[in-house]
Amino acid sequence: MSSLPGLATDLVDGVDALFLFSPSGSYYERATDLEDTDVVVVAQENTVGADEFVELPLDFAEVTERVRFGVEGALDNGVVEDGELLACATSVFGDDIDTISRVRADDSAHSGIYDLFVNSRADPSVIRDVLDVVIELGRKGQKGKPVGALFVVGDAGKVMNKSRPLSYNPFEKSHVHVGDPIVNVMLKEFSRLDGAFVITDSGKIASAYRYLEPSAEGVDIPKGLGTRHMAAASITRDTNAVSVVLSESDGLVRAFKGGELVLELDPEAY
Amino acid sequence: MEVSQFVAENYDYILAAVIVALGFVTGVLARRMNERVMEALGVGDAVEGTSVERTARDFGTTTTAFVARISGWVIYGVAIVLAVRVVNPLLATALWVQVTGYLPNVVIALVVLVVGLIAGDKAELAVSERLRGVKLPEIGVIPVAARYSVVFVAALVALSQLGVATTALVVAFAAYLAAGIILTVVATRDLLAAGAAGLYLLLTEPYGIGDTIRVEDMEGFVQEVDVFVTRIEDDGTEYVVPNHLVLRSGVVRVID
């Protein structure tokens, strides 16, 4: 004889840690009363004052990305061990926690999404700001038309040495940073230019209009992606930069690190 | 006794009564108007959550009501003193004149103090908001120092308004400020020099990101130039060079 709560119990049976994604204060309080289960909070800000905390740089709309980020972050911080069973409580439809999924922490399924933000040369906030701009550009396009864009973030000196200018650099002698609202408007305007944007570790826009000339040897990206993605992937293999690409044809935002695709987002979902 | 004589004798009392009544009406009107003006200017929202407002709430009133009430009291007081003078000029001795002359100072001092306390609270809030990103427990001293500096200045102004000798306090405050400034200058001398040099470097950009340069014996390509430092990288080594060093010892641009 089975019952509904009994079926749900199977989901959380024998888990080693409970992951709470952006829990409310009272929910977290109730969770900490649990015995023999670690509680890990994954959120943009540690508002509940949790001991084990993984910072979410983006409000991932896709649940799989959100869970993957949280689990990889926890593995990286040593909060959970490889092979442990985890229950991830998160929200899918509303703001409150409404979904629980059972995940096994698996070091070999490392997608590098946590790595992209935390272990890159550039500041995590800079990468987040760039992603924000690109997502907004993908959602609205340039004057309503879809545009493509390529941002290379971090290790700017090396990137500059592995690229050449296509024309005058509009950011010459200007000292602006991504994340300032006015700069985001400028970036959108300049996205009609060909070539890549180069951004330093601290978020300063070093140049626009750069033609990247990395060696594409040994770079393996999914078939069907064009030259912009190829250039983006290659430059991250040759330097310690990460690159964020908005595809003109399918409108998706992709991030590359170490020559590999680590993140794929649909801007429409944000 | 003639009626006219009675009227003449009591005329002063009637006049006094009229003055008191007028004073009362004006006082109430002034109080209401002040309260409304302050509400319209958003004073109520501005003082929300400050210590003055909390104290006022403890006494069952609000800051705006309190300040408005003071203006009412002043007018009542002036009306009563005027009435007393009309009835019996002898009572209006030099002491009374002094007291009435002194009253506005007390009011101004009170208002300055209230404003100072509110401004202090606001200053503390603003500074701690600015420093929120700095995760250093000891940083909490700075907002408190800002708050008490503002309150101290307000108290000084209020005391000097009352005619209390404040020279010693002014000297103490000047010494405190001077110590703060001297300490800051001594402690941040290098930062100031680097910042001044950095401004020049950022404005004229003698070298850009990606250029290969040599400063003293450090050679590499430029990763980043900010106000204080230039980061030069060379094969897994990053030199963080203070900008004043770049200006002082000069920079060599290596063109292949």
Image (cartoon, coloured by chain):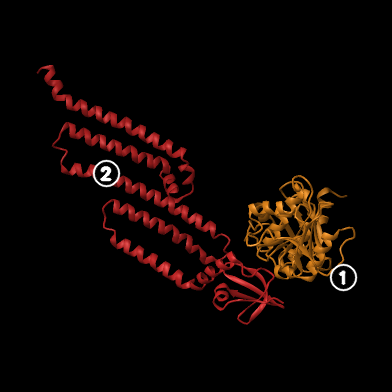
Chain colours: A orange, B red
Evaluate whether residue A54 shows in this view.
no
Identity of the residue furthest to the left in this view: B1
In the displayed structure image, the side of residue A27 where residue B141 appears, left or right: left
Q: Chain of mark 2?
A: B
Q: Chain of mark 1?
A: A
Identity of the residue furthest to the bottom in this view: B217
Depth check: B16 or B134 in front? B134
Q: Quadrant of residue A258?
A: bottom right
Q: Nearer the viewer, mark 2 or mark 1?
A: 1
Residue drawn at the location 49% of the way across and 71% of the way down? B188
In the rendered image, which residue does mark 1 sit on?
A218
Depth check: B133 or B203 in front? B203
Q: Quadrant of residue A233?
A: bottom right
Badge 1 amino acid: Gly
In the displayed structure image, the side of residue A240 where residue B3 appears, left or right: left
Badge 2 amino acid: Leu
In the rendered image, which residue does mark 2 sit on?
B103
Evaluate whether residue B77 shows in this view.
yes
Q: Secondary structure at mark 2?
A: helix
Q: Position of residue B167 (x, y in %)?
A: 28, 61
Q: Quadrant of residue B131?
A: bottom right
Q: Position of residue B242 (x, y in %)?
A: 57, 74
The quadrant of the picture occupied by the N terminus of chain B is: top left
Location of residue A262 with respect to B157 vertically, above or below? below
In the displayed structure image, the side of residue A74 where residue A229 appears, left or right: right
Q: Which mark is residue B178?
A: none
Q: Secondary structure at mark 1?
A: loop
Depth check: B130 or A192 in front? A192
The quadrant of the picture occupied by the C terminus of chain B is: bottom right
